[in-house]
Image (cartoon, rainbow, N blue to C red):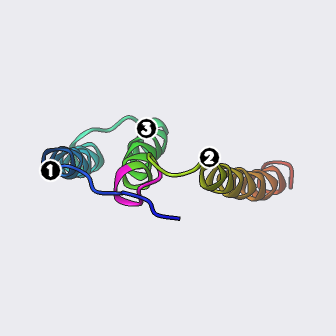
Amino acid sequence: MSHNHIMPFKTNLTVFLSLVSLTALTVYTAKFVDLGSFNIILAMMIASVKASLVLGWFMHLKGDSNMNKVIIFSSFCFVALLAGICYSDLFFRY
């Protein structure tokens, strides 16, 4: 099975510059913006966008088969389930 995962240089450069700018945005919001308890939510939202860029382009998931997409999605659901169990234990402990 031969897959052609060659991306144009312009696309790779655009994704790389997006990742760098999102990292700069994360650092800026962490140091200079005080949103209270929303800081962690904003940081996780930015990290999720960065993770989707890495998964889609640099790990070639965008042009890959649907089976790999299902495997990645199910692993994220499993991690979310485990985090939900941990948070429910933490919130309902007292």
Residue 59 is a magenta residue: yes
CA–CA distance between discs 2 and 1? 26 Å
Disc nearest the viewer among 1 and 3 = 1
> Disc 1 residue type?
Leu
Considering only order in the chain, which callout, 3 or 2, is on the residue closer to the N terminus?
3
* Separation (CA) of disc 1 from disc 3: 34 Å
Q: Quadrant of residue 49?
A: top left
The numbered disc on residue 66 is 2
Q: Is residue 27 magenta?
A: no
Crowdedness of circle 1 by 10 Å Cα count: few (<14), some, many (20+)?
Answer: few
**Residue at the image position 35 percent from the left and 51 percent from the top:** 57
**Residue at which label 3 appears:** 36
The secondary structure that most of the magenta stretch takes on is loop
Question: In the orientation shown, which residue stands out farthest toward the front?
Answer: 1
- Residue closest to the eye, 6 or 41: 6
- Alpha-carbon neighbours of circle 3 within 10 Å: few (<14), some, or many (≥20)? few
- Measuring 81% from the left and 55% from the top, which residue is drawn there? 85
Q: Nearer the viewer, mark 2 or mark 1?
A: 2
Is 55 left, or right, of 13 in this rendering? right
Residue type, label 3: Gly
Q: Of callouts 1 and 3, which one flags the residue occurring earlier in the amino acid sequence?
A: 1
Looking at the image, residue 17 lies above or below residue 75: above
Distance between the alpha carbons at the discs numbered 2 and 3 = 40 Å
The stretch of residues the image draws in magenta is 57-61
Image coordinates of residue 11 in percent, x first then y, are 20, 45
Residue under the image location 78 percent in, 49 percent down: 91
Identify which residue, 41 or 16, lies in the foreground: 16
x, y percentage for residue 31? 23, 50
